[in-house]
Image: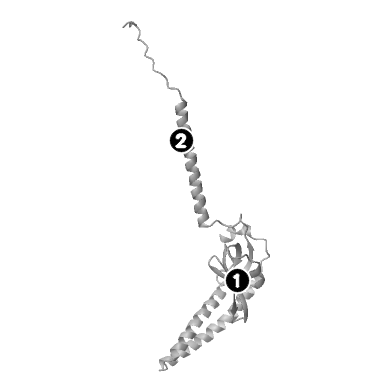
Amino acid sequence: MAAGRFEHLRGTQAPDEERAKRGILRSMVIWTPAFALLTVGAVYMMVDALGGNGGAWFGFSLFALIGLLSGFSALSAFRDWFSEPIDTTGQVARKWRKFDLLIFFRAHYVLVARRVFRVPRLMFDEMPEPGGWVYLNHYPHTNAVVSWRPLGEDERPRTEEEEEREAQEAERSRDIEDAWEQRRREREREATPTRERVDLPTFGESRDE
């Protein structure tokens, strides 16, 4: 359904599904072993803590928390490996850069329609500043971008505030038209001459009477 809805927005940029798939595979390779190692570490820390080492609970909490995060990332990558890309349109709410410890260089992120996308630097530089509208074709769980393009003013969907304002203006126009129509009918009634009623005498009666 979504693919059909946004089909007319495609075609301005060649999709790079191979690059997106490489990113998903890289996430699987990184996060799956990390999840396994962290799970083993969490179990070891828990056993040590139950054996009487109270300080091991901190290590267990740390391993468990990072393990859950890495497990979620690994699961998302596995799900996207067997999924199809979806479409999203929205305003760029935020753009930012941060140093990623796993890949040891600065990563680039954009926030669109409450989704965070990590994008290449060139794509990051080409995307409009916050407030601009974009169309993205991406995988649903890792948000790996296949293709994107900016949306013109006549292509972007209307916001709720704009739809509400348009509805109010349309209602106001209808009220004005109804008022003019009512006034026109009143003028027609006023312009129609009133017929005077004439009483004619009946047959056989005298006019003098």
Q: Nearer the viewer, residue 70 or 198?
A: 198
The number of discs equals 2
> Which residue is most to the left?
209
Q: Amino acid at mark 2?
A: Gln
Residue 144: quarter of image? bottom right
* Residue at x 55% of width, y 84% of height: 34
Image quadrant occupied by the N terminus: bottom right
Q: Which mark is residue 144?
A: 1
The quadrant of the picture occupied by the C terminus is top left
Locate residue 138, reporting x and y percent. 60, 67
Instruction: Give the residue type at disc 1.
Output: Ala
Identify the disc placed on residue 202: none
Q: Residues within 10 Å of mark 1 (few under 14, many from 20)?
A: many
Note whether 159 is above or below 39 in the view shown: above
Question: Is 134 or 8 nearer to us in this picture?
Answer: 134
Place of residue 131 in the rendered image (x, y in percent of width and height, measured from the top left):
58, 63
Q: Kindly state the secondary structure of the residue where label 1 is placed.
A: loop
Per the model, the C-alpha gap separating discs 2 and 1 is 59 Å
* Foreground: disc 2 or disc 1: 2
Image vertical order of residue 141 relative to residue 67, above or below: above
**Where is residue 89 shown, x and y percent of the image?**
58, 62
**Residue at the (56%, 61%) spot, across then down:** 2
Residue drawn 47% across and 26% down? Answer: 191
Q: Quadrant of residue 6?
A: bottom right
Callout 2: helix, strand or loop?
A: helix
Task: Please name the residue that numbered disc 2 is placed on.
Answer: 182
Q: Nearer the viewer, residue 24 or 59?
A: 59
